[in-house]
Amino acid sequence: MEIIEKYFPGITSLQRKQFEQLFMLYSYWNTRINVISRKDINNLYERHVLHSLAIAKIIQFREGTDLMDVGTGGGFPGIPLAIYFPGSKFFLIDSTGKKIKVVNAIINSLGLVNARAEQIRVENIRREFDFIISRAVTNLQKFFKLVEKNIRSAGYNDLPNGILYLKGEEVTEEVGDHKSNTRVYHLSEYFDEEFFTTKKIVYVYIPHRTDKSASMTCAG
């Protein structure tokens, strides 16, 4: 828990309590349904919670921001971000029912009224969101094609609506045709721990769904 307060010292007492509960909850559920590598449970706060919260170093979501976490697995990055941004709305999806059972149980235990989870494939989601978030569920090019339809054109955050994708490998080839609309953030610039040396956030916005005249240079 100390590592969270190291990088996010301004959390409220409620947020601190909710973050503290995560270890007990994931330890309990992980013995029943494996959503985190059992050898990794002791690294929960660094490799899962803080990794998820890295998105909060890139953007501070404004009140009412609507987000979908695709391929949430055990609830990452959606659950930590829902704790940190209580004024935003999070829809967590995964195709594996057992994982969603755990995610919903943890959401309920934490009392997160701004998050919900559902077993469904993203191909079957028709509604739009301000941001799509995910932890490297597939190749970026494939992911773009799956979620482009779900990005709302109008936005009111400091970054145009788009995709925030947590990655651990080189991303240049995967970005492909979206290079001019992509920005890569290296997490080693925000966190000291060795785990983050190769970790990145890839932010992509879709020009034809936002501003056709806008363009950004890839920082990767």
Image (spheres, rainbow, N blue to C red):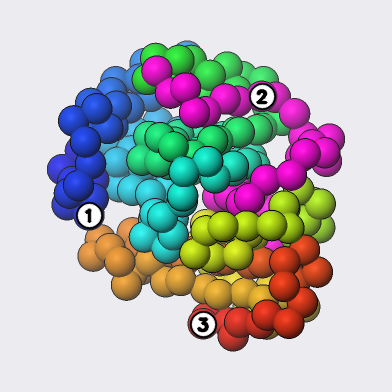
Please tell me the numbered disc located at residue 7. 1
Residue 138 lies in the magenta stretch? yes
Disc 3 or 1, which lies upstream in sequence?
1
In this view, 37 is above or below 106:
below
Residue type, label 2 = Glu
- The amino acid sitting under disc 1 is Tyr
Considering depth in this image, is 42 or 121 the residue closer to the camera?
121
Residue at image location 42% in from the left, 71% down from the top: 186
For marks 3 and 2, give the CA distance. 34 Å
Viewer-proximal residue among 198 and 105: 105
Considering the numbered disc 1 on the image, is that residue within a helix, a strand or a loop?
helix
The disc, 3 or 2, on the residue closer to the chain's N-terminal end is: 2
Callout 2: SS:
strand
Residue at 49% in and 64% down:
158
Question: Label 3 amino acid?
Answer: Ala
Indicate the position of residue 205 as horizontal and vertical percent values: 66, 66
Position in image of residue 74 (x %, y %)? 51, 31
Q: Position of residue 55 (x, y in %)?
A: 44, 55
127 in the magenta segment: yes
Q: Neighbour class for label 3 at 10 Å: few (<14), some, many (≥20)?
A: few
| Residue occupying the point 57% across, 17% down | 101
The dot on residue 118 is: 2
Left or right placement of residue 44 versus residue 202 in this view = left
Which residue range is magenta in the image?
Answer: 111-140
| Mark 2 vs mark 1, CA separation in Å | 31 Å
- Tell me the residue that label 3 is attached to: 219
Q: Quadrant of the N terminus?
A: top left
